[in-house]
Amino acid sequence: MKGLWMSLLMATMMASAAPIYKVVKEDGTVVYTDNPEQAAESMQLKPVNTANPLMTEKQQQALQEALQQQQDKAVNYQLSIVSPANEETIWNNQGKFNVRGQMNPQGTGGEFQLFVNGNKLQSGTSALFALSDLERGEYQLQLKYVNNSGKILALSQVTRVYLHRMSVLFNKN
């Protein structure tokens, strides 16, 4: 029986190289061969199941190095709020002021978003925003630059500003 399994294994390995023949001897033993003999029956073997080998350590290391190189090529954006300055006091009776950001390197295809006190207030393709009708008080400003799928590519530091408006109770006399 062991010989039969060994023969089948050998036959399977050689199946793609040569045709296989089955020969039944006079004593009833079965022999598989690649030599056609008299009274040999041609065999059609099923395809051999195969699997791709796992990556070697060298291949895994090469793949990790390639991925690291790709990450190193990724753009590192630096986004900051240029105006108003942090801790700046703004005097405006209409509650208006502009927020201007700067990003290096320049991005393409993304969107700038202005967050005021943690809430998204405006968005656009430019890092310049005009705010109006704000009440007097403290405001925390932050800019985000996002790609088309919403992934944040750059984030500015929070800038704190103070808006002052002249009181209607103020008497000029």
Image (cartoon, rainbow, N blue to C red):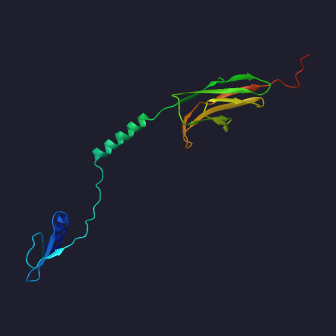
The image quadrant of residue 101 is: top right
Point out residue 6 in the picture as x, y percentages from the top left corner. Answer: 16, 69
Where residue 105 appears, x then y in whole percent?
A: 51, 28
Q: Is residue 38 left or right of residue 45?
A: left
In the image, taking residue 122 as reference, residue 95 lies left or right, namely right
Q: Is residue 103 left or right of residue 170?
A: left
Quarter of the image where the C terminus is located:
top right
Q: How many marks?
A: 0
Quarter of the image for residue 118 reads: top right
Question: In this view of the protein, which residue sits in the foreground, 46 or 159?
Answer: 46
Identify which residue, 45 or 74, lies in the foreground.
45
Determine whether 7 is above or below 134 in the image: below
- Tell me if residue 88 comes above or below residue 6 in the rendering: above
Quadrant housing the N terminus: bottom left
Q: Is residue 13 above or below residue 53?
A: below
Q: Position of residue 24 (x, y in %)?
A: 12, 80
- Location of residue 25 by image quarter: bottom left
Q: Nearer the viewer, residue 142 or 96?
A: 96
Residue occupying the point 67% across, 31% down: 140
